[in-house]
Image (spheres, grey):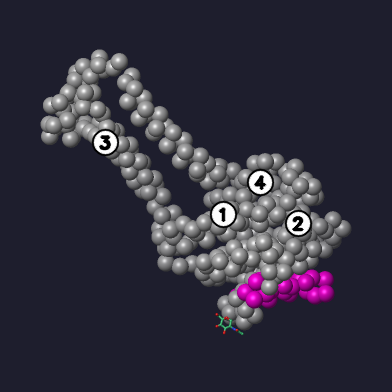
Amino acid sequence: MRRGVLIFLVCNIALVLFLLHSVWTLLELLVFNGIEDAITREELPAIGAEHDDEDGQLIPKIIHQTYINTSIPEVWQEAQQSCLDFHKKPDWEYKLWTDKASLEFIAEEYPEFLETFENYRYPIQRADAIRYFVLDHFGGVYIDLDDGCNRPLEPLLNYPAFVRKTVPTGVSNDAMGAVPHHPFFQRVIEELQNYDRSWVLPYITVMASTGPLFLSIIWRHYTDEGYNIGDGPEGGRIRILFPEEYNNYPWSFFTHHLGNSWHGYDVQLIFWMARNWVLLTIVGFILGGGLLFLGWWSYHRYLLTPSDVPRWKTQSARSRVPFWSRQRHRSEYELVNRHEP
Ligand SMILES: *[C@@H]1O[C@H](CO)[C@@H](O)[C@H](O)[C@H]1NC(C)=O
């Protein structure tokens, strides 16, 4: 094979490997579902028997929620109330993290993170971040305001930490719990700074810097490394609440109310992309193939030294149609081959 072709192939393979490496965790998330850490229905008490066995309780009885201020919009009041009703004082503590309270808390307890926290471009990034910090500091259960409670959460307190699985891939940050200083959430808050990057679309920026995509990536890395991280209960294991235990069934812990309040214009695009992923994949392959082809062609057209290519080829208009010239003049290439030192 000619040296030029070899270099071309190696460069392309390197590029493909690099791209694969960059998205490897995302690809893994498509197949990795965390089933081995599932909280199964068999190990959970029946409805009404939630309080029978509270001896093994690890997670403190605190519910955390976030909102701009204390005037919770009417659409979420019912959901909020359902959680308050199942988890009453004085047994349970309820903490609403307003913007002001969140900022004060970070300034006081995690001052090294304050600058990043204040500089987040979108308020929802602060709303995402604060939940990881309060779980690290106080422990407890964080619940999004649009999630209501369907039964007492006590059984979930017997696990050192849990997050919720989303379909088709990854985990969400809308309902999760942990003991204070659980190694998973410690890892999460450590990584926030590294993932504070801006992507073109706000939705992706939020998802990947603080939101569910960020959490899923950290989760994948964390579980990949095994559970012997830190010395938390169960060696830092994080358990997974699967969709049926999350909502829609009589035995589920939560009910999902009105959807995400913060989605903007770009979300339409993302959802459209999700619906049309087959088409997009095909287009992606065509574009990728086209780029490869273009690279190959430019290489021939501009980079081969004149002595490599017969003069008539670089000048002829035909040679600008690469396929054509390649097929018609295979013999010319063979001729060129012989010039290799
Ligand atoms: C809380 O925030 C909402 C939305 O920004 C605003 O309309 C409302 O007036 C605020 N309430 C208080 C008490 O500041």
The 10 Å Cα crowd at callout 1, few under 14, some 14 to 19, many 20 or more, is few
* Left or right: residue 215 compared with residue 18: right
- Sequence-first tag of 4 and 2: 2
Give the residue drawn at x 47%, y 38%.
18
The 10 Å Cα crowd at callout 4, few under 14, some 14 to 19, many 20 or more, is some
- Sequence-first tag of 3 and 4: 4
Please check the rendered image and state whether residue 81 is part of the magenta-colored stretch, yes or no.
yes
Residue 182 — which label?
A: none
Give the residue drawn at x 79%, y 47%.
231
Distance from disc 1 to disc 3, alpha carbons, whole Å, reads: 36 Å
Residue 325: name its quadrant. top left
- Sequence-first tag of 1 and 2: 2
> Label 2, on which residue?
181
* Left or right: residue 222 compared with residue 315: right
Residue 338: name its quadrant. top left
Distance from disc 2 to disc 3, alpha carbons, whole Å, reads: 55 Å
> Label 4, on which residue?
222
Q: Amino acid at mark 2?
A: His
* Magenta-highlighted residues: 76-103
The 10 Å Cα crowd at callout 3, few under 14, some 14 to 19, many 20 or more, is some
> Label 3, on which residue?
298
Mark yes or no: residue 237 visible: yes
The residue tagged with tag 4: helix, strand or loop?
helix
| Circles 3 and 4: CB atoms closer than 8 Å | no
Please check the rendered image and state whether residue 273 is part of the magenta-colored stretch, yes or no.
no
**Please, is residue 273 above or below residue 19 in the view?**
below
The residue tagged with tag 3: helix, strand or loop?
helix
> Label 1, on which residue?
195
- Sequence-first tag of 1 and 3: 1
**Please, is residue 326 above or below residue 290 in the view?**
above
Q: Amino acid at mark 1?
A: Tyr
